[in-house]
Amino acid sequence: MNQRLWGYEAINGAQDLRLDKKTGSLTPGKEADIIILDATAINVAPLNQVPGAVVSLMDRTNVETVIVAGKVRKWKGKLLDVDLPHLRQQLEASRTISSPRLASSRTCSAAIKANRVSRTRGGSGRPVCRSAAIPAT
């Protein structure tokens, strides 16, 4: 696939969604999300066909820079403006509440009191914490 086809896909997609005045091409005044990939990494060597390498060989480790609506979000492989310890803590807390196997009775009771989850009986007959947003099966 040549470069012109890549461009047609972007502009035609924007036109189909009626967003071509806002996005779809690298034009001053339009929004753009840009990803810069590392093509020198060993997982894409030898780099014979760029589109094929992007689709078949590259993974998250090849993402070097990410720009979203003009703001750099990742630079030289490092996330910017992200508090990873806080995010990790939030993820751990959500796993504890939403996973029946990992939910302790204290965490479940506290979540029920806060009206964040409801207590139902699972197939085993034991009380199980379930998110109020997820219907009980």
Image: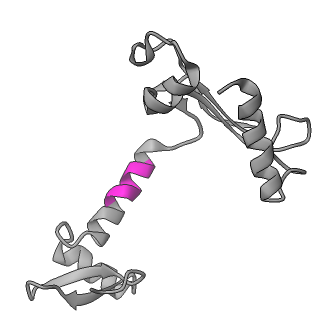
**In percent of the image, x 59 and y 40: which residue is there?**
81
Residue 94 locus on image (x, y percent)? 35, 65
- Is residue 10 depicted above or below 52 in this figure? below
Residue 45 locus on image (x, y percent)? 43, 11
**In percent of the image, x 80 and y 43: which residue is there?**
11
Asked whether 13 or 65 is in front, the reply is 13
Q: Is residue 5 left or right of residue 22?
A: left
Looking at the rendering, which quadrant does residue 44 occupy? top left
**In percent of the image, x 79 and y 56: which residue is there?**
16
Q: Is residue 26 left or right of residue 79?
A: right
**In percent of the image, x 53 and y 16: which residue is there?**
39
Q: Is residue 63 visible in the rendered structure shown here?
A: no
Name the main secondary structure of what is drawn in magenta: helix
**Residue farthest to the front, as pictured:** 1
User: Is residue 93 found inside the magenta-colored segment of the image?
Assistant: no
Q: Which residues are magenta?
A: 86-92
Residue 7 locus on image (x, y percent)? 77, 34
**Residue farthest to the left, as pictured:** 124
Residue 100 locus on image (x, y percent)? 21, 73
Asked whether 100 or 82 is in front, the reply is 100
Q: Is residue 4 left or right of residue 67?
A: right
- Is residue 82 depicted above or below 21 in this figure? above
Count of marks, rendered view: 0
Asked whether 25 or 97 is in front, the reply is 25
- Is residue 62 depicted above or below 42 in this figure? below
Looking at the rendering, which quadrant does residue 115 occupy? bottom left
The quadrant of the image that shows the C terminus is bottom left
- Is residue 19 depicted above or below 71 in this figure? below
State how the image is colored: one colour
The quadrant of the image that shows the N terminus is top right
Q: Is residue 127 visible in the rendered structure shown here?
A: yes
